[in-house]
Amino acid sequence: MAVAAFDRGRIARLVLLLALAALLVAMRGHTLGEPIQRDLLIYAFIGEGLLEGGTLYDDWIDLKPPGPYVLFGAAGALLGVGHVQMFVLGLAAALATMAGLQRLFAGSLEAPWAGVAAAALWVAIGSDLLLQANEPNTEAFINAFLVWALALMLGLPHDRVGWAGALGVGVLFAIATTFKHVAIVPAVLLCLAHLIVRRETLPRAFAQCAIAGTVVVATWLAMAGWFAVHRRFDVFWETLVLYPAEYGTVTGRTLGANLLAGLSHEHFFDPAMGAYAWALVALAAVTIAGLVAGRREWAYLAAFLAGTFVAVAAPGWFFPHYDQLWLPALAIGLGVGLVELRDRRVPWPGLAAGAAALVLAAGLGRSAPQYRLDARAWSETKYQTIFTSAEDLGRALGEILREDERIHVHGVLPNLYLAAGRRPMTHVANLWFTLPDYGRRLAPRATATALADLERAPPDVVVFDGFTASFEPKDLPLRAWLDRHYRVVAEVPGHAGFALAVRQDADPDLVARIEALPSRVPTSADAAPTR
């Protein structure tokens, strides 16, 4: 009888998890055709360039560690650069996070139904529109790696070191940091929590954390050594050590001021977060109460929350997609709460199921209405028309230009290239690095690289993005070079407006085609329906 009940319970959980996975696939598939956000295509184009023999940080200049470019490059090699690539990457990260949440509770916590509830909440909120969480940005992968690292950490043995598990935790932490530096903060805090929770076996717990930490350090030393062997350590140091220290101050605040700003009503309770912010406040209060009551295992959740806060606030930019780092914490909080109910002998499963249903209903209450919008409307809700208008213009350019006619986008709208069937004309895929206030120490090198690329193969058409132009200083060398060699012949409405330029000695036929182009680009009123 017990075996049969166990089998029925296991089968029921498996069926539910498969249903959740299918729902997640359908939810992500709903936005498959969404115009691709700039960061994602920058990773994809750089990854593609590396596969073609380019070098990272001196040929292809960007500010992230190697993780995104390697992953997007591999996916691009298999799937091509574009919407399918983004769909598969985003879905893989979301499914991995869901599986990690289930594993977290089904393992040493021996609460598989709490894991199902946590996974269900993740499916309900993990693709949130306002947090841009349906996109495979770096945060999506960091979530997956950290959730699995925590699941492995909780499963580390008490009576021995458990080398395999400790190495696994270290590998997951290390990979997370290769996507974004700030992932090191929750990793360190989770290790500190591990020492607190396992203080009766402190030597073994310390050894486990030391092994994990050694893997992280060895990973970064290996990356630095690779660049040094190839005589490019100075580029590695400047891009991944010195510039990130400056990046958090571009907004005019220090690191401490960024953290304080993260607690402000303006940023923590911003409209994108909405009710999530209040849920996090409640979760933090319950976590503190649990620690005060002697539930030291809640130190893991406290570390996860604190580490996530630093990861979100430290850069100082407070972009909505940063806030998706909070979503696994909410799912873990639900699971931990259900385990607490079980341990306190609260009637189970009735009350626990009711509590889980209430939280899931709240999550679905926010996310379900978002699916009344089509993929284009998702983009415009998040970014206004910045990417939809760029895609419209790119598609129109692709229709009128000959195959050998090249486009350069003076801005950060790489989806225009994709829509036009083109690739960037310069290795500086993010031209904001040529702006002194943003590029800082990287600006001279980024400018020299962009100028060399454009002089070597001058584009036939230059698209000036009005949004980027509004930030340019008057003496920007790259813009001065373009103004000397190109003349604007047409303007197209858009998020901030586009100006289309051709060479001073351009063929009259090309000039005529570009001058006629605005009539071919749909205005916001002519664009495809968004609702």
Image (cartoon, rainbow, N blue to C red):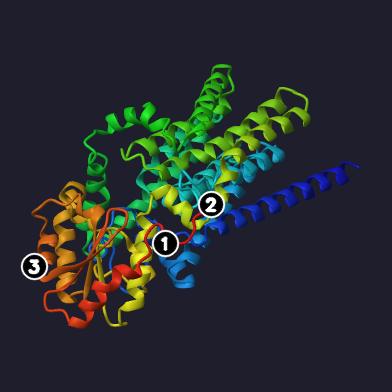
Between the C-alphas of marks 3 and 2, the distance is 44 Å
Position of 483 relative to 307 (above/below):
below
- Residue 87 lies left or right of residue 98; in this view the side is left
Q: Quadrant of residue 294?
A: top right
Q: Tag 3: Cα neighbours inside 10 Å, few (<14), some, or many (≥20)?
A: few
Q: Earlier in the sequence, mark 2 or mark 1?
A: 2
Expressed as whole percent of the image width and height from the top left, the position of residue 451 reads 15, 67
Q: Please give the residue where the numbered disc 3 appears in the rendered image.
A: 484
Expressed as whole percent of the image width and height from the top left, the position of residue 504 reads 11, 74
Give the image location of residue 397, x and y in percent: 32, 72
The foreground one among 273 and 40 is 273
Q: Give the residue number, with chain letter if any, for mark 2.
A: 373
The three-letter code of the residue at mark 2 reads: Leu
Mark positioned earlier in the residue sequence (3 or 2)? 2
Where disc 3 sits, the SS reads helix
Question: Which secondary structure lies at badge 1?
Answer: loop
Q: Is residue 351 in view from this perspective?
A: yes
Disc sitting over residue 469 in the figure: none
Spatial CA span between label 1 and label 3:
35 Å
Outermost residue, top side: 293
Residue identified by numbered label 1: 526
Look at label 1 and name its amino acid. Asp
What quarter of the picture does the N terminus occupy? Answer: top right
* Disc 1 versus disc 3: nearer the observer: 1
Which residue corresponds to the image point at 65% horizontal and 38% vertical from the top-left?
A: 108
How crowded pointer 2 is (Cα within 10 Å; few <14, some 14-19, many 20+) is rated as some
Whether the residues at callouts 1 and 3 have beta carbons within 8 Å, the answer is no
Reply above or below: 412 against 399.
above
Q: Quarter of the image holding residue 271?
A: top left
Disc 2 is placed on an element classified as loop
